[in-house]
Image (cartoon, rainbow, N blue to C red):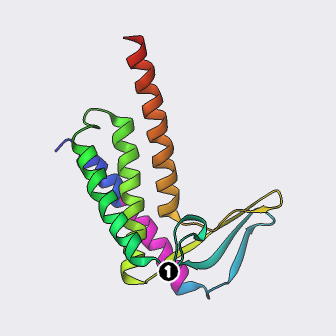
Amino acid sequence: MENARYYLLALFVIIVDQWTKWLVVTSMELGQQITLIKEFFYLHSHRNRGAAFGILQGQMWLFIIVTIVVIIAVIYYLHTEAKGNALLSTSLALILGGAIGNFIDRLFRGEVVDFLDFYIITYDFPIFNIADSALVIGVGLIAIAFLLDSRTTKET
């Protein structure tokens, strides 16, 4: 199967995401913060019942429905549009792994476990997790893939 490596990448993201969340839930009190790099990077046990940046708090059914649609769309595109395009396939695999990682939290915990907390100069960036990182990187790679594809299309 041509896409097996991309499903393995998605599975890797899910495993690392769930393992790190399990470590936070079992090793830290809710709200506890551990300094890793003073004034820059902390582990901060946090829960989020909303979407990115805490928006749409408590809209669990909306997130479940949207995530199911996203998972179906990503799998469809992985098998159709991304065929033979390693960059697009990798980006879709990261999105798939990230979406499923947070989906698991919503289904079984009723909230998403976040723990990566960065301060950039004086700005406290919203706390996030491995699944969120995979989603952001995946979307960024899709943008790059589309830019490269549009340049190739213009040149021909």
* Residue in the foreground of this view, choosing between 109 and 73: 73
Whether residue 134 is situated above or below residue 57 in the rendered picture: above
| Residue 104 coordinates in the image, percent (x, y) | 37, 74
Quadrant position of the N terminus in the picture: top left
- Residue at image position (57%, 69%) is 55
Question: Left or right of 116: which side holds 138?
Answer: left
Q: Main secondary structure of the magenta part?
A: helix
- Give neighbour class at mark 1: few <14, some 14-19, many 20+ (Cα, 10 Å): some
Residue farthest top in this picture: 156
Whether residue 106 is situated above or below residue 26 in the rendered picture: above
- Residue at image position (37%, 83%) is 108
Give the residues in magenta: 12-25
| Residue 83 coordinates in the image, percent (x, y) | 25, 36
* Residue in the foreground of this view, choosing between 128 and 3: 128
| Residue 12 coordinates in the image, percent (x, y) | 37, 59
Q: Secondary structure at mark 1?
A: loop
- Residue at image position (63%, 68%) is 127
Q: Which residue is mark 1?
A: 58
Residue farthest left in this picture: 1
Is 80 contained in the magenta span? no
| Residue 44 coordinates in the image, percent (x, y) | 65, 76
- Residue at image position (44%, 65%) is 16
Instruction: Tell me which amino acid carries mark 1.
Output: Gly
